[in-house]
Amino acid sequence: MMLGEFYVLSFVTAIKITADFLRESSRAARLEKVQMETELRFLRSQISPHFFFNTLNNIYSLSLENSTKTPDVVLKLSELMRYLVYETKPNKQCLKKEILCIQNYLDLERIRYGALLNIDLSISGDIEDKKIAPMLLIPFVENAFKHGANKNIGEVCIKIDFIIQDDFLFFKIRNTATSESYVQKLENAGGIGIENVKKRLELGYAKDEYQLEIHNLKNEFIVDLKLKLQCV
């Protein structure tokens, strides 16, 4: 074999090996993406039923009391279901709509707790044209009520802050403490609580795009989340 032919054959072989490698790498990347999207859909699907069951329990409690508030709760729940079923995007959702969803949930809890509930919600910064993973924050709000609210302990205080700065969301929620550890309850809430959110953050965001901290203090529990927002 001539030297020139050897070089040509080597060059062609190298191209083929490189092409095969790139093809397999691309295939592996596609499979990994599909697997990630499937897992994200599964994690998200866990949240909505849990969310609905909690609200249905609220309706049941009100119905036992023959409360005139029951129709309002049913109406609010139908609005939330419409949003979750028909309006929630698979990957990213408008931050403004997510905040509205949380506000509707808070309205439901206001009906349930009445004068016992003290909610302070503040929004700072531009929430227009910003996107976030759907239903990412609502588990924190749910658990603030589930594990930090109890009619038997008197007034329930919950403070929620949304601060948008330099394409980052700084989300903080704090609530009055009950006797049991908030963190422990979050982790044991049927896989729906903190572990679900952590997994969704790992799958949906790069490591430098979020920071999650849970603070279990003597009289209150605090969740701090810094999250990179996607601009429209």
Image (tube, rainbow, N blue to C red):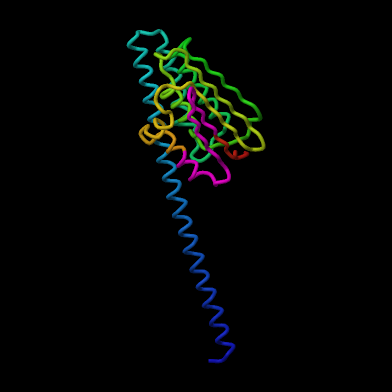
Taking the view exactly as shown, the residue that stands out farthest to the bottom is 1
Placement of 7 over or under 65, stated as above or below: below
Number of marks in picture: 0
Residue found 46% across the figure and 31% down from its top = 86
Locate the C terminus and report the quarter of the image it occupies. Answer: top right
Was residue 201 drawn as part of the magenta stretch in this picture?
A: yes
**Can the viewer see residue 47 in this picture?**
no
> Horizontal placement of 200 versus 232: left or right?
left
Residue 5 visible, this orientation: yes
User: Image point 45% across, 18% down: which residue?
Assistant: 109
Q: Picture quarter containing residue 97?
A: top right
Q: Nearer the viewer, residue 221 or 93?
A: 221
> Left or right: where does residue 176 sit relative to residue 164?
left
Q: Measuring 41% from the left and 39% from the top, which residue is drawn there?
A: 43
228 w.r.t. 172: above or below:
below
Q: Where in the figure is residue 61, as x and y percent of width and height?
A: 35, 15
> Left or right of 87: which side holds 65?
left
Q: Is residue 152 above or below residue 47?
A: above
Residue 199 point in image, percent of width and height: 45, 42
The quadrant in which residue 195 appears is top left
Q: Percent position (x, y) of residue 145?
A: 44, 22
Residue 96, given in percent of the width and then of the height, sits at 58, 29
Residue lying at the far left in this picture: please name it: 64
In the image, 205 versus 120, the foreground residue is 120
Q: Which region shows up in magenta?
A: 198-224
Residue 136 in the magenta stretch? The answer is no
